[in-house]
Image (cartoon, rainbow, N blue to C red):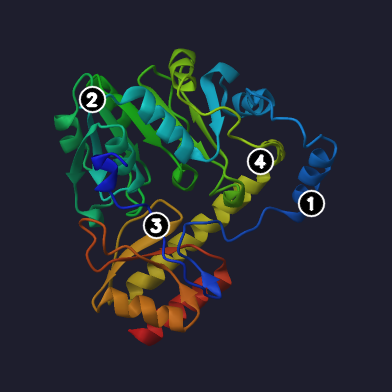
């Protein structure tokens, strides 16, 4: 028998649909470069597959520390940032702990808090402002509470205003800061603090979503506590090798970010010029918008034309809304042409 809390939950799911142009999961449209794939394969061929990965992923943690001006004791790695988020919530959320987060947000946050028997405290906000509801989060946060914030925020694209993290830390709360889309907003890793845990990913700007690579940064003291909860050996040798090659070639991330930001801004302007859409401000690699017509009908008509985006209408405050990931210029042109045609 499952716990009653779990029995009452719905699983995190994604409807599987096929389309020539896939713009529904905020993935990079650019594959990891072929020459770098070959470098990863070469490293894997030299290593025995019969042996477990390095327990501490020391080489990767050292490389991340060099790249971000930290020490390896400040870093944990895992099978995607979601695994590390789950471990962190397991470490910092006790039964009844208040956990504040803006809503709409990534639905996994509330699910993980519920599994931990924490007390979810969503702060609803209107997504067309381009900013997260900092003042109301500050009013709800207290010493002993936890705040989860993603900036840029998924699925809205809005950001936490400048100084927001420092203000949230001043409340005495523990802050879980998800910067999965931070590269597209030009952010930097915030200073370390015992009550600040920052989550990053190789999925978006490094084009490695298929390998599930995440890492977190905090003080050595906080990382020691989270390590007690984190599953061992969760990052396989193939993914670790790919992450090392990626960090040795930062031009991949820099190129991807530059191209996607340029395309994002171009697509936003084109969508607004259509005049039939409410386009939400975004600093991420996706755009949320509300058409004047029924979103579900537009979603299906786009699929009929070979273009898959995301229907996010089920999110609170996002009734009749859709979200499109930024693709290649050719994919974006095809999406924009379809929007123009469909009205």
On the rendered structure, is 101 left or right of 330? left
Q: Circle 2 sits in a helix, a strand or a loop, which is it?
A: loop
- Give the residue displayed 62% in from the left and 51% down from the top: 255
- Circle 3 sits on which residue? 13
Name the spot of residue 95 as percent of width and height, x first: 24, 26
- Give the residue displayed 24% in from the left and 69% down from the top: 320
- Give the residue displayed 44% in from the left and 45% down from the top: 185
Q: Are marks 1 and 3 in contact (CB under 8 Å)?
A: no
Q: Nearer the viewer, residue 19 or 265?
A: 19
The relative height of residue 69 versus residue 19 in the rendered view (above or below) is above
Residue 35 is tagged as 1
Pick whichever of labels 3 and 2 is earlier in the sequence: 3
Q: Are marks 2 and 1 in contact (CB under 8 Å)?
A: no
Q: CA distance from mark 3 to mark 4?
A: 24 Å
Query: Outermost residue toward the front?
Result: 1
Residue 112 is tagged as none
Q: Quadrant of the N terminus?
A: top left
């Amino acid at each position: 028998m499952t716990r009653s809390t779990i029995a009452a939950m719905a699983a995190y799911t994604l409807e599987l649909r096929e389309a020539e142009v896939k713009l529904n999961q905020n993935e990079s449209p650019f594959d990891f470069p072929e020459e770098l794939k070959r470098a990863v394969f070469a490293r894997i061929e030299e290593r025995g597959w019969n042996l477990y990965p390095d327990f501490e992923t020391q080489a990767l943690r050292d490389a991340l520390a060099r790249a971000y001006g930290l020490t390896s004791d400040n870093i944990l790695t895992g099978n995607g940032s979601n695994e590390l988020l789950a471990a962190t919530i397991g470490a910092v959320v006790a039964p009844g702990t208040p956990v504040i987060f803006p809503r709409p947000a990534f639905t996994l946050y509330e699910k993980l808090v519920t599994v931990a028997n924490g007390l979810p405290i969503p702060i609803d906000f209107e997504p067309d402002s381009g900013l997260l509801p900092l003042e109301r989060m500050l009013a709800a946060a207290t010493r002993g509470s936890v705040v989860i914030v993603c900036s840029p925020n998924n699925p809205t694209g809005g950001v936490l205003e400048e100084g927001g993290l420092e203000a949230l830390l001043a409340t005495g709360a523990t802050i879980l800061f998800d910067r999965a889309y931070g590269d597209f907003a030009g952010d930097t890793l915030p200073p370390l603090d015992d009550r600040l845990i920052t989550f990053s990913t190789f999925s978006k700007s490094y084009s490695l979503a298929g390998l599930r690579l995440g890492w977190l940064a905090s003080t050595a003291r906080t990382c020691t506590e989270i390590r007690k909860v984190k599953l061992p050996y969760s990052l396989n040798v193939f993914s670790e090798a790919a992450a090392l090659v990626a960090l040795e070639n930062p031009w991949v991330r820099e190129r991807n970010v530059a191209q996607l930001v340029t395309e994002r801004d171009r697509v936003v302007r084109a969508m607004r010029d259509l005049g039939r859409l409410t386009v939400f401000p975004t600093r991420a690699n996706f755009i949320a918008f509300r058409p004047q017509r029924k979103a579900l009908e537009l979603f299906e008509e786009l699929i009929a034309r070979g273009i898959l985006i995301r229907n996010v209408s089920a999110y609170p405050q996002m009734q009749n809304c859709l979200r499109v990931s930024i693709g290649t210029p050719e994919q974006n042109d095809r999406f924009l042409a379809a929007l123009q045609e469909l009205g």
